[in-house]
Image (tube, helix red, strand yellow):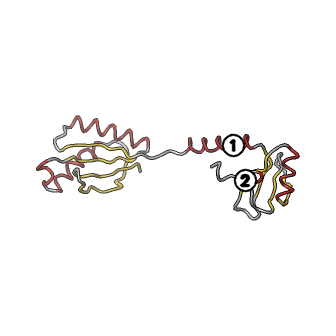
Amino acid sequence: MTNQIRINHQIRSPELRVIGSEGENLGILTLSEALKAANENGQDLIEISPNAKPPVAKIMDYGKFQYAEKKRMKAAKAKSHSVETKTIQVKIGTGEHDLELKAKKASEWLKEGHRIKIELFLIGRTKYMDFQFLKQRLERILKLITEEYKIADSPKKSPKGITTIIEKV
C-alpha cells in the first residue's frame, strides 16, 4: 500500500486539488504552490486520490497518515469473515453413533457459516458398488444434521469416493 501513495516530490501531476491540514479546501493549486504550503506548515503533501481529475492531495504528517491507514485496514480485516470449507469423512461402515457425532460437528460449523464437504470415503471393492446405494449411505449423515442447510454441490464421484458440499441457507 505504501509504495502506491506518493508524497511531496514523488507526485507527478502538475496541478492538484489540495486539502489543508485542518480539512479545509485550499482549491486547485500547482504542484509547487502545494509543496510550498505543505513546507510552511512543516508537514507533507500526500496524494490521497491519484485517479481524480485533478488528483486530490492533503497536507498532513505522513506518519499520522500511515497510522490512520493501518488502523482502517485492520478494522476492515476484522469485519470481513472468511468462509472456510470444512471436511467430514465418512466410510460405508461408519456406525450410527459416530455419524451422530460428525453430524453434530457439521451443525456447529454450519451455525458459524462455514461450507462443509462431506466425503463418503470408498476403499477397495466399495468403489464399484451401485451409485444409488452409495448415495443413500451419504444421505444418512445429511438426515442427522440439525441446522438448516442447502446442497451447494450435489453428490458426485471423486477420486476418494463420493462427495457433496452443503452450506447454510
Residue at screen point 23% across, 35% down: 98
Q: Residue furthest front?
A: 9
The residue labelled by disc 2 is: 48
| Quarter residue 57 falls in | bottom right
Query: SS of the residue at dot 1?
Result: helix
The residue labelled by disc 1 is: 66
Instruction: Work out whether residue 135 or residue 7 is closer to the camera in this orientation and state it.
Output: 7
Q: Residue furthest left?
A: 125
152 with respect to 160 (left or right): right
**Looking at the picture, how far across and down is residue 30, in whole percent?**
84, 60
Question: Counting residues from the N terminus, which is met first, the one under dot 2 or under dot 1?
Answer: 2
Q: Residue furthest right?
A: 40
78 with respect to 16 (left or right): left
For the residue marked with disc 1, what is the amino acid?
Answer: Gln
Callout 1 environment at 10 Å: few (<14), some (14 to 19), or many (20+)?
Answer: few
For the residue marked with disc 2, what is the amino acid?
Answer: Ile
**Looking at the picture, how far across and down is residue 26, in whole percent?**
86, 55
Callout 2 environment at 10 Å: few (<14), some (14 to 19), or many (20+)?
Answer: some
**Looking at the picture, how far across and down is residue 66, in whole percent?**
69, 43
Query: SS of the residue at dot 2?
Result: strand
6 with respect to 122 (left or right): right
Instruction: Work out whether residue 57 or residue 135 is closer to the camera in this orientation and state it.
Output: 57
Residue at screen point 18% across, 52% down: 134
Q: Which disc number belongs to residue 148?
A: none
Spatial CA distance of label 2 from label 1 is 12 Å
**Looking at the picture, how far across and down is residue 21, in whole percent?**
82, 46
